[in-house]
């Protein structure tokens, strides 16, 4: 196999016509990789994604060829998948106001050009889920773009499909999450074109790295929510006074353990499986 890309969290290998996508235990916040590993994180992301790929199979095809036909050293954290031409847009759906969406709302009373009512606060539920695409920056931060910007990039037909698929994945995820006492506040997905020209779901889906998960029984609009996702370690990093530029701060053992515990809890609550 040939290593063709090493990202902040994932490594991608070429194996003939296939790709081997490996989720490591690295964690990144504010575009910087923290020096500590989160034990089992890569396996948790991979196994939760595989579970969601099955739940969403009737919504959109996915890139998975096999989760078993991978090198032994990557067992549990790797997927053999199809090569795709990735869509040059980050596809995001939001059902609640948080993170960069909150910041955009506070400035413009809209997110990605979608107007929102006055009076919303951090954690507010939106009137309906919205499609809030961003750029896919090679360097630096992604920026919000409007639906018309997406049309300009990929054409109207593809833009409409991206919006439809993203919102349907969010709605399905939010519905399943609600059955298990989990609010899915927002989620980001990756889509690509297959060799036949159809849109295919790729990378990860509805994980603690790509979504905000909140316990429904403690949801209170007006401030930060208890996070079963990467927001917990992101908030910790910000609280240290770090300037959000490399090198990232050392991570205390208790933050590593608390992060791992959150990833495990949401995996177990959603799938009904016990992590071991």
Image (cartoon, grey):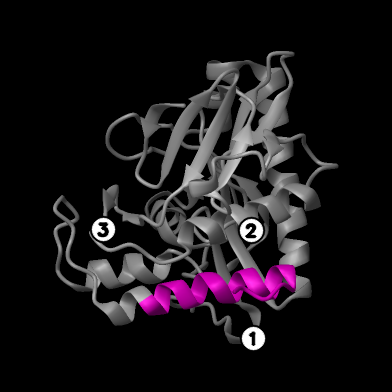
**Image quadrant for the C terminus?**
bottom right
* Residue receiving disc 2: 48
Which mark sits nearer the N-terminus, 2 or 3?
Answer: 3
Residue 246 visible to an observer of this rendering: yes
* SS assignment for the magenta stretch, majority: helix
How far is the residue under mark 2 from the one under mark 3?
22 Å
Query: Magenta part of the protein: which range?
Result: 257-276
Residue indicated by mark 1: 217
Q: SS class of the residue under badge 1?
A: helix
Percent position (x, y) of residue 238?
A: 24, 67
Q: How crowded is mark 1: few (under 14 residues within 10 Å), some or many (20 or more)?
A: few
The reply to whether callout 2 and callout 3 are in contact (CB within 8 Å) is: no
Q: Distance between the residues labelled 1 and 3?
A: 31 Å
Regarding residue 116, the answer to whether it shows in the image is: no
**Residue drawn at 60 percent across, 18 percent down:** 17
In screen coordinates, is 161 left or right of 36?
A: right
Label 3 environment density (alpha carbons within 10 Å; few <14, some 14–19, many ≥20): many
Q: Label 1 to label 2, Cα distance in Å?
A: 22 Å
Q: In the image, is residue 172 above or below residue 219?
A: above
**Percent from the top left, x then y, of residue 135?**
43, 32
Helix, strand or loop status at disc 2: helix
- Residue ID at (71%, 72%): 273
Q: Name the residue under label 3.
A: 34
Classify 100 as above or below 218.
above
């Amino acid at each position: 196999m040939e290593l063709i890309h090493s990202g902040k969290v994932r490594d991608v290998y070429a194996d003939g016509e296939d790709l081997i996508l490996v989720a490591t235990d690295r964690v990144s916040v504010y575009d910087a990789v923290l020096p500590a590993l989160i034990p089992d994180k890569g396996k948790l992301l991979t196994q939760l994604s595989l579970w969601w790929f099955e739940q969403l199979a009737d919504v959109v095809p996915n890139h998975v060829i096999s989760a078993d036909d991978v090198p032994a050293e990557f067992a549990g954290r790797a997927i053999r998948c199809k090569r795709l031409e990735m869509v040059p847009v980050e596809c995001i759906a939001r059902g609640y106001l948080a993170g960069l969406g909150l910041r955009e709302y506070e400035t413009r009373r809209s997110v990605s050009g979608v107007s929102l009512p006055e009076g919303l606060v951090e954690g507010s539920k939106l009137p309906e889920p919205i499609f809030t695409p961003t750029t896919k920056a090679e360097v630096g931060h992604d920026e919000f773009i409007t639906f018309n910007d997406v049309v300009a990039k990929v054409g109207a037909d593809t833009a409409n499909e991206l919006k439809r698929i993203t919102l349907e994945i969010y709605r399905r995820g939010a519905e399943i999450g609600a059955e298990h006492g989990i609010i899915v506040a927002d989620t980001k997905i990756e889509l690509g074109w297959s060799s036949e020209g159809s849109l295919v779901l790729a990378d990860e889906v509805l994980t603690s790295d790509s979504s905000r998960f909140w316990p429904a029984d403690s949801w209170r609009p007006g401030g930060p929510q208890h996070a079963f996702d990467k927001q917990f370690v992101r908030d910790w990093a910000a609280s240290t006074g770090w300037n959000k530029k490399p090198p990232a701060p050392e991570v205390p053992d208790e933050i590593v353990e608390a992060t791992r515990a959150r990833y495990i809890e949401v995996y177990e609550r959603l799938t009904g499986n016990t992590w071991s």
